Image: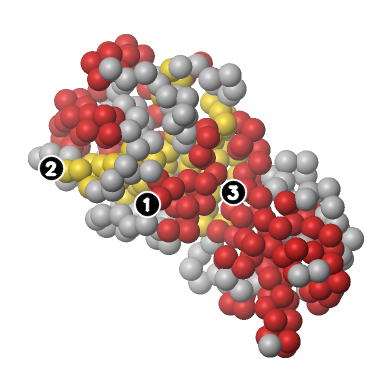
Amino acid sequence: MNSGAVPSGAGPSGAGPSGGGALGAAQLLGPTEIRELAARLGIQPSKRLGQNFVVDGGTVTKITALAKVGPQDVVIEVGPGFGSLTLPLLAAVGRVLAIEVDQALARQLPLTVTERAPDLAGKLDVVTADAVRVTSLPGPAPTALVANLPYNVAVPVVLHMLATVPSLARALVMVQAEVADRMCAPPGSRTYGVPSAKLAWFGAARKAGSVSRAVFWPVPRVDSGLVELIRRQPDEPAPGGRAVSREAVFAVIDAAFSQRRKTLRSALATWAGSAAAAEEILRSAGVDPALRGEALGIAEFARIAAAQRAVSLRDA
């Protein structure tokens, strides 16, 4: 898809004096309205795009409240679909930047907002693009990510948005329940792995609630979970200090979990150049080479990356 902002049409920039407020139930999208929109556009939910649309107004209202966003926020919504969540978000925040890969849905979204909540239409921008390939966004700097994410790309989208949009201070995303567990897992747990370790680089993730599969169309085979992430403050030191980059730390994480059952000495051998080199780096970082990757937190991964850099500089 080509990236570009799609104007949302004319309209005032706020809904009331504060730019926020609740929508009436009649303005929200329910099962009937969404199916009518789908029929009008000739759209069938795509498994390839991971499309499962929320059809319950209470659920999207709850998500908006749990996101803790207000008129001061510029919110990114990835995969807005027909606009179920977009509408209550527009009523609550200063601006919504919706990123939608489906061209038909991207074209329809501003029209739906104009039809159902014309006073909010001026607060919407739509970018027609694949969210994991977006490198720049129009308008004011976004402060939050709030989205019902496609199951098949949830973690890559969150990581890409956090890496690409440094102004994002918080996120609340709905993902497959199992993915929510992995995103929030602590070191040493059965579900801890690459997603949880990489998210910890950016901030603290926690499960913020569960969502029944019954509120979706089509109904998925699994329930969903809400994940909240609070980004590390700009004045907080990054894990490992300034000695290492995010890319270097993520390379260590990828290597450590590429052979999950192996010790770090073995799992990091290719990354380090040899098992002996991996052991030297690990010991220099104060990490036991006999441990497995699942035992380490983000600070330990950062120390390993810093130690590797120090060894490289020494041997250069």
Helix, strand or loop under label 3 = strand
Q: Tell me which label, 1 or 3, sits earlier in the chain.
A: 1
Helix, strand or loop under label 1 = loop
Dot 2 and dot 3 residues touching (CB under 8 Å): no
Helix, strand or loop under label 2 = loop
Residue 202: x and y, percent?
55, 59
Q: Is 275 located above or below residue 5 in the figure?
A: below
Q: Is 171 located above or below residue 27 in the figure?
A: below
Q: Tell me which label, 2 or 3, sits earlier in the chain.
A: 2
Residue of label 1: 134
Residue 205 — which label? 3
Q: Residues within 10 Å of mark 2 (few under 14, many from 20)?
A: some
Q: Residue at x 16, y 25 (%)?
A: 115
* CA distance separating discs 1 and 2: 28 Å
Q: Residue at x 37, y 18 (%)?
A: 44
Residue of label 2: 12
